[in-house]
Image (tube, rainbow, N blue to C red):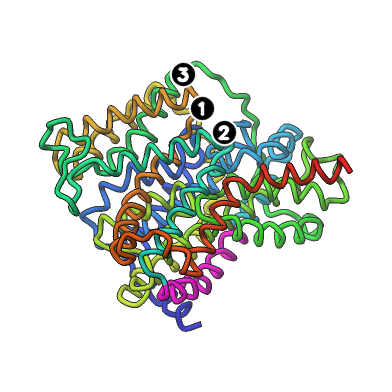
Amino acid sequence: MDGFLHAISIMTDPYLLFVILCGTVGGVLVGALPGLTSTMATALLLPFTVMMPPVPAIALLSALYCAGTFGGSITAILINAPGAPPAAATAIDGYPMAQRGEAGRALGMATVSSTIGGIFSVIVLLVAAPMLARMAYSFGPPEYFALALFGLSMLASITKGSAVKNLIGGAFGVLVATVGIDFTTGVERFTFGYPEMTEGIHFIPVMIGIFGGAELLSQAASLDMVYNRVAAIAVKLPSKEDFKLVWKTIVRSCGIGTFIGILPAEGGTVAAMIGYNKARRWSKNKDEFGSGAIEGIAGPEAANNAATGGAMVPTLALGIPGSGTTAVILGALLVHGLRPGPYLFQEQPDLLYGIFGAMLVANILFLGIGLVGAKLFARITLIPRTFLWPAVFVLAVVGAYSLEQAMVDVGIMLVFGLLGFVLRRYGFAPAPIIMGIILGDLVENTLKQSLLLFEHDWTMFFGRPIAVSFFILTFLGLFGPFLFGQIRKMVRGK
């Protein structure tokens, strides 16, 4: 309770409130634009927050994260073009409702469900993150190595694509993280004789390129795409009957979304799909799903917004990103010289309460913004892509250069933009690569420290119960689906 009151008191700072308002409005705008995601927006914005104090900088990115997740529902409902991947499930029933003249009812339900899910997850974050951080005091290098390995194994399910390709992408990210001088041995690795490479490849230009640059090239192939637009009636709150119908769905999805968000490398997209499936499974009106069921909006929207707070739990408490966007926020913490984990809760409580408060205020703000301005925000889809994406490209170049004022970072951004575009053509998602880069340093350093601690006897890992637990979870994450499938086949065969 003291932490909650502290978070509220921090929000009385006018400058911080203004920053959160900007992040919320920007997040809704970004979320409503098909192709732009909160992950891409935070990656583009990150270099510009370097000169800000840590609390406003992280609060800005956190508010954008929350609002961007909600913003995708606006275009998902109105034009059947999800502005963000987590809103894909919302379009299944939201667009049919809009087509039959109930766009206001659909948008109202999406707004209210998103707000409830977001606030619920922030409360869980406020309680669970400090508890998890206290547990992390018992972690040493072997436990952190096992945890990071578990985080990498979870990349198999971070996107809907091939699990093998996701793991390959994560392994490639770990390889990129090894570029530069190994400070343990002094050996240069993969520098190819370029002095600029001795300090390694900074993840910010990589993030900007692989999200922004690759998306620019992808969108260039769909410049002439025309969306079917539906006129939205006045946005209004759902009726009491609607709430009576969906309240159980919202409560269920809040729990599902928060739990899925806490799992390393999961995120809003997975939570939304599970929330939608569970809403349909427990509904008395299963036949309405797919043709305009209001429960089909409440389920995924509550779940994907609940996942935002859940994803911040392992990010802040353990330094393991819970989603693609929290990987960027983790990068922002590192840029500001802050290392997530138990000591962050002890030494930087103001920063943490600022994050809690920012996410709470952002969820309250987009309730009003969504109900009042949804029709207005939906009109930004009229912006021609021939103007929008070149502007995004210019912002990407400026952001990459501004970090170190070095053209080599612009070159890295361009190379990874082209690489990201090619990899997408072959089914490789960008998020596993980024998370592999961020977790790569943690894996390498903790492995070295552990082997020094064990005098190079790797079998001593198995004398650490917490590390063994994470090794078991890693094994189950990688091979569990296959093993359980084989067991089911054997049982059915009998």
Instruction: Give 98 or 192, whichever is nearer the viewer.
Output: 192
Q: Earlier in the sequence, mark 3 or mark 2?
A: 2
Quadrant in the picture for the C terminus: top right
- Marks 1 and 3, how far apart at CA: 21 Å
Does the magenta-highlighted stretch encompass residue 239? no
Instruction: Give 197 or 23, whichever is nearer the viewer.
Output: 197
32 is higher (above) or lower (below) than 265: above
Q: Residue at x 12, y 31 (%)?
A: 193
**Tag 1–tag 2 contact (CB < 8 Å):** yes
Please tell me whether the stretch drawn in magenta is mainly helix, strand or loop.
helix
Position of 230 compared to 424: left or right?
A: right
Asked which quadrant contains residue 172, the reply is top left
- Marks 1 and 2, how far apart at CA: 7 Å
Are there few (<14), some (14-19), or many (20+) residues within 10 Å of tag 1? few
Q: Which amino acid, by three-letter code, is at mark 3?
A: Leu
Q: Which amino acid, by three-letter code, is at mark 1?
A: Gly
Q: Which residues are magenta?
A: 115-138
Would you say residue 372 is visible in this rendering?
no
Does the magenta-highlighted stretch encompass residue 123? yes
Task: Return the mark for residue 162.
Answer: 2
Helix, strand or loop at mark 3: loop
Residue 33 in the image: x percent, y percent? 49, 35
Residue 471 in the image: x percent, y percent? 51, 57
Q: Which amino acid, by three-letter code, is at mark 2?
A: Ser
Are there few (<14), some (14-19), or many (20+) residues within 10 Å of tag 2? some
Q: Residue at x 43, y 41 (%)?
A: 170
Q: Earlier in the sequence, mark 1 or mark 2?
A: 2
Q: Earlier in the sequence, mark 1 or mark 3?
A: 3
Residue 221 in the image: x percent, y percent? 46, 17
Asked which quadrant contains residue 344, the reply is bottom left
| Pointer 3 residue | 223
| Pointer 1 residue | 427
